[in-house]
Image (cartoon, helix red, strand yellow):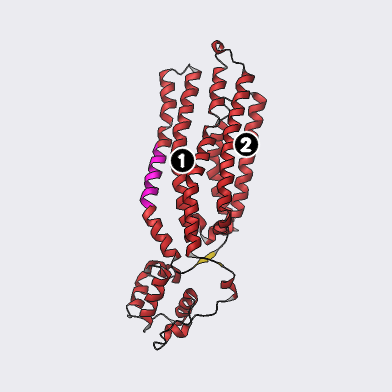
Amino acid sequence: MIFADKLIQLRKKAGWSQEELAEQMNVTRQSVSKWEGAQSVPDLKKIIHLSALFGVSTDYLLKDEMEDVEYSIPSDEASTLRRVSMEEANAFLSVKAMSSKPIALATFLCILSPICLFILGAVSEVPEYNLTDNVAGGIGIIILLIFVTIAVAIFISTGRKTAEFDYLEKEVFETEYGVSGMVAERKAQYNGTYTRNNIIGASLCIMALIPLFGGASFNDENELLLIIMLCVSFVVAGIGVVFFVSSGIIWASYEKLLQEGDYSKVKKETKSTTTAISAAYWLIITAIYLGYSLSTNNWGYSWIIWVIAGVVFPALAMITNLFSKRK
């Protein structure tokens, strides 16, 4: 068997396309095509790279008379990398697909949690309803905490189910033959659904402003009406976020296994710093929100802190990534 036939056989066994092999070898797809078409032979350096990539000996690649695969002994560096089997990959994708909807629901509950607080705060300003600020604030906080508690319980429950696969997000790993090809194929099949859900989510988030501006246009002096319209905006935006989150989790599961996008080998080296800063940032924002709201009892307007924090956060993340790359 000649080198070209062996290369085709090894590539297909690994589940890679010519483009994927070319990316692994840092060459063009045309180069791989010429190798497989017996139009050219890679130099010795690339032969050694192919040997390490497929785990076979250089003799097997170069000697036509060797028909049986001769596997090479992995180096100490390669042996330290965890290898993901086809069974593990399928189990991870299944768990992520099942957990995407509960996590989206929990996120939706977090978005809805302050709605009762907003409405009751506005109602307390209307004398006819005879509702004091303290009662309105107390009931609103209780309902908010109930919603958040349910959401946190869902987050913890789903997190436990995927805890065994945390290394896919944090560590550099290798995949067994066929895993990358299977994941890439499923990702390509899901691409249409992912795009459609992103379009729906973005459209709903934009349309969420319609009730608020509509209420202001109808009667901008009626505070209760404005708060109700604001809450409707929260609901519409929350539904949009559900589309983002549910499809985003599934899409991210493919990227984790393929080590692409935010889960590439380079990004994993800087992710721990970004995660720590992100956690600290949102804890500080939460403290500011609660501190201001409790001290001023201005729950009806303190929500603007979250809007400002959400706008500032992407800039903070960008700066953090920039410094991490320089470092």
Image-based side of 63 in relation to 120, left or right: left
Q: Is residue 283 magenta?
A: no
Q: Nearer the viewer, residue 198 or 189?
A: 189
Mark 2 or mark 1: which comes first in sequence?
Answer: 1
**In the rendered image of this protein, does residue 85 appear above or below residue 224?**
below
Magenta segment, which residues?
Answer: 191-203
**In the rendered image of this protein, does residue 196 appear above or below residue 31?**
above
Count of residue discs = 2
Question: x, y (%) of residue 275?
Answer: 60, 50
Q: Which residue is mark 2?
A: 286
Image-based side of 36 in relation to 327, left or right: left
Assign the N terminus to one quadrant of the image.
bottom left
Q: CA distance from mark 2 to mark 1?
A: 22 Å
Amino acid at the residue labelled 1: Val
Question: x, y (%) of residue 216?
Answer: 44, 22
Q: Nearer the viewer, residue 243 or 30?
A: 243
Question: x, y (%) of residue 289?
Answer: 62, 32
Q: Which residue is mark 1?
A: 242
Residue at horizontal 49%, vertical 62%? Answer: 87
> What secondary structure is marked by label 2?
helix
Q: Evaluate if marks 2 and 1 touch, with contact meaning CB atoms under 8 Å apart.
A: no
Q: Residues within 10 Å of mark 2 (few under 14, many from 20)?
A: some
**In the rendered image of this protein, does residue 144 appear above or below residue 14?**
above
Amino acid at the residue labelled 2: Thr
Q: Residues within 10 Å of mark 1 (few under 14, many from 20)?
A: many
